[in-house]
Image: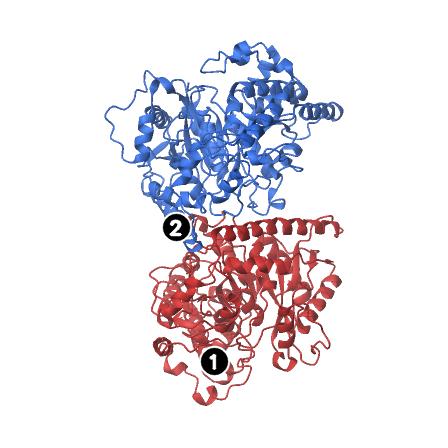
Chain colours: A red, B blue
Amino acid sequence: MAEPSPSCKEISQKAQEALLAKIPSEWRIPSSILSNLPRNVKPVFKSAGILTPQELDITDATDATTILEKIRSRTWSAREVTVAFCKRAAMAQQLVKCLMDIDFEGAIKRAMELDEIMEKTGQPVGPLHGLPVSIKDLTIVKGMHYSLGLAAWHDRKSDDDAVAVKSLRKAGAVVYVKTTMPQTGMALETTSNLWGRTLNPANTNLSAGGSSGGEGALNACHGAPIGIATDIGGSIRAPAAFNGLYGIKPTSRRCSYLGNTIPVPGQIAIPSAIGPMGRSLRDLELICETWLQDRPWYADPSVVPLPWVRQPAPQKATIGVLWFDEVVMPHPPVRRALRETVDKLKAAGHEIVDFKPYKHSYSWDVTLPLYFPTAARQLKEILAQVGDTMIPSVQQLSKGTKELTVPELMKFQAAQVSFQQEYLRHWNETASLTSTGQPVDAILCPSAACASFPHDFLPWWGYFSVWNLLNYPAMILPAGTVNKEIDVADQGYVPVTDWDKANHEVYDPELFDGAPISLQLVGRYLEEEKLFAVANAVDRDALQGRV
Amino acid sequence: MAEPSPSCKEISQKAQEALLAKIPSEWRIPSSILSNLPRNVKPVFKSAGILTPQELDITDATDATTILEKIRSRTWSAREVTVAFCKRAAMAQQLVKCLMDIDFEGAIKRAMELDEIMEKTGQPVGPLHGLPVSIKDLTIVKGMHYSLGLAAWHDRKSDDDAVAVKSLRKAGAVVYVKTTMPQTGMALETTSNLWGRTLNPANTNLSAGGSSGGEGALNACHGAPIGIATDIGGSIRAPAAFNGLYGIKPTSRRCSYLGNTIPVPGQIAIPSAIGPMGRSLRDLELICETWLQDRPWYADPSVVPLPWVRQPAPQKATIGVLWFDEVVMPHPPVRRALRETVDKLKAAGHEIVDFKPYKHSYSWDVTLPLYFPTAARQLKEILAQVGDTMIPSVQQLSKGTKELTVPELMKFQAAQVSFQQEYLRHWNETASLTSTGQPVDAILCPSAACASFPHDFLPWWGYFSVWNLLNYPAMILPAGTVNKEIDVADQGYVPVTDWDKANHEVYDPELFDGAPISLQLVGRYLEEEKLFAVANAVDRDALQGRV
């Protein structure tokens, strides 16, 4: 990567110092610990001695739903919960650089107000009463920074909340931190000249994923009970997958995206989607339901007016398994997780059929120019304002693109529409494979072809991005961890594409050992509730207790 | 207009001759009548002596619902109904040139099959059992032509049905004719070198409207009980309004558009919408409901999976009235219809508030470049293939546009998104005007600033197109006819824009006398059922019995 300009470096240094200054000295991790960190930094949260036993209990609770129950039962106050997560988030920032703004004071003040209301009325203000929620950089929060990891935007603050944030606050949530994303957002890792690199807490030699890598790392550190992220090509799912979290990328336009900063507005073919990542499926559904109960279509004209109607998890689901997209062969641990999960699902009585990939390589050829119709020209102009330099993975991703003419753009947009029609037909045709005569309920596939990757590596986006091009909802389900003894490298594998070759060569059991593995479950357009129902069945019957 | 090439003229002549050849000689109107037609050709259907008394009864029935009841009760057979409409459509073609393909034989055969099924099973095949339905040119029908009024496409036939057509057939509908549209579809009148000019049957000196002018003219002639049309900027509503019909442009993506021919695919900012026009609101809702009950989202990935749920007409609706969009003052008869309707609604107990227009002039500045991002370059290339020449109104409309770059297109697309957000806020703010404290249920406004216009005139699209830019559903409700004695020209009116001046100058009570007047009722994004409910209330309380 080219060196950023001195002024860019100065901006970044000041921004990072200002952020650090928001962390009280008693929450600072001693330099003796910081200078000698293990590859997996998670044990430090207990060993550093900063968190009290109660704070460890709170932050290590099963999930947000558990925390909410304990607040409602007055076991924990909202203040206690908020302080615990503020402290742990402050520690996470020092260990893996996952934050880009902090409002501990405002959060604790709000938590105390919530405690008072509960005291006076005996009632919570809403389903999220007292729950700290972390928010990604680009989602605007009143009085807090947003930057998209762009040094040129280091001093931008919002005077309003995004629609999704308003709904969370109304339901009782407490906003206390904003989390990092890579410069421009178009990366599956999280690094920028402005905020530095966000590390994967389970293995700091591996990427935390991106673009919502700050959320992934913070939640994996238990520095947040739930996080709000966005996804245009894997940005919720990669960090969820690489950090062992649950995550959902809903259909775009199901939840409100209004108030999410878009670096270059006007790209409408592949809209980004907002969604939660966290520790359980029930937490994720609680967030989605809370949003939808607020009827966001009356606040954001792009939201489809489709109320959230929960569905029960089926006893017997019909699931199509996409083993390999014919572009990049998943690494051994990913294949193992998928195979073992399928075996358990079959044993539990679910019907499993093979789902053939449909032109996934072609889908990328349509997707990439739609991401970069101007070959990132406008982004480069923003970077140039302060001598910011493009991060290597975005540079590598965009370098093959060219500035399109309008007729060329229209051809790609038309190709997307046709691909959506063909893929729907393809999905419908699975009816010929099932005993019910109905198409499969969902597709189970790798989250990515890897469990993570070393820093600055450009991974294959296809397992994520094909569902963005199609605009299908997609869920990440944790499915164990890499075991270097079992997950040995493929010997003699002959890659089928350049992407496949790069992915094949990057696998190293020693490097990946202990990294979380995840699977992806994909539903039909705007059928989030059904996807949750099937995900609950898969989680219940095949994934509980996986390590 | 430039002269089309000799080969274009030859193509057109042959196409029109081939079409005429599909009309049996006994259904031909004598040249003695054709050579001496009154301005209002509607009386000819009875006076020509071609239709039997029963055929007149059938075709002049109140609405499609009445016809369906009479088929179900065996008063009329499907065959009798189909033959009656085939004959009347054949006559309409000779009087106003509203057809571009005919399949009388296939239709009558299908009607006889339906009669047999009813005979054998005692049951109709579906809610549209035996109902003839006319289909617009661009909506594909198996074995029939589609052309978009382009001479270059004179010999195109489809080997499949559009999704919407499939659903209609499944419900028992009989397809028998396809109707004209203007060359390219981007006109509010209906003319092409290929098929000639479609006339307004109530007044052949006035436009039948467009782009679904064939549907408008045919249905106004009672040559169809219901018609299927499409609308990207007024194309359902102008013909419905100018011909005294009910019509709805649903939100685009509510009903399936798959199988509608798009001249230059890939324009995705303002998608066209498909919808019915006909003789009653209940007919329109029957068609929409029939489509949605077929779950089109499993056949067309662009359709929102939102089942149709009927709503009762309210006793008291809250309606915002948009009297004037501040760009073009509606003609006297349109203002009178709106005023009289509002008076009746008030008298019936509805709450009426003024709805201020929000940047309607600006909305057109955003809309036009999104319609023609390449300044119609690709359209011109198609025309040039056979020496077809652009019709004057399209030429005039597109001449001010320029070929955009991708960043320019993105700016207009971003401007559309912002405008949608601002307009939603604007609508929500009507809550401060109502006694309920809720925003208005619907907006009542002119359909257009005129009741029609003379041929080749370019009218102001704004009263229609603003709802396309916003993607709100909009309904046309017939509201009487122009009365030259009452609706005298405005004396001394000072136009506020060039569009206003042209519209002001085109009004002539003598020319417009007897032309249908209509009003437009606009609902919120994807809330078609509520729009129908309010429309039913408006129709019941203010429009029944209007002449």
Q: Is residue A215 above or below residue B57?
A: below
Q: Is residue B324 above or below residue B337?
A: below
* Amino acid tagged 2: Ala
Looking at the picture, tell me which residue is in the foreground, A100 or B213: B213
Disc 1 is attached to a residue of which chain? A
- Identify the residue at image location x=67%, y=25%: B107
Please state the horizontal and vertical placement of residue A451, each as a whole percent of the image: 61, 72
Residue B226 sits in which quadrant? top right
Looking at the picture, tell me which residue is in the foreground, B15 or A355: B15
Residue A467 sits in which quadrant? bottom right
Please state the horizontal and vertical placement of residue B166, each as a whole percent of the image: 64, 36
Number of other residues with Cα within 10 Å of mark 1, as a class: few under 14, some 14 to 19, many 20 or more = many
Could you confirm whether marks 2 and 1 are on the same chain?
no
Looking at the picture, tell me which residue is in the foreground, A63 or A478: A478
**Which residue corresponds to mark 2?**
B415
Please state the horizontal and vertical placement of residue B383, each as a whole percent of the image: 52, 38
Please state the horizontal and vertical placement of residue B384, each as a whole percent of the image: 52, 39
Does residue A40 appear to the left or right of A431 in the view shown? left
Looking at the picture, tell me which residue is in the foreground, A169 or B518: B518
- Identify the residue at image location x=38%, y=59%: A161
Figure quadrant of the C terminus of chain A: bottom right
Residue located farthest toward the bottom when viewing the structure as drawn = A32
Determine the secondary structure under disc 2. helix
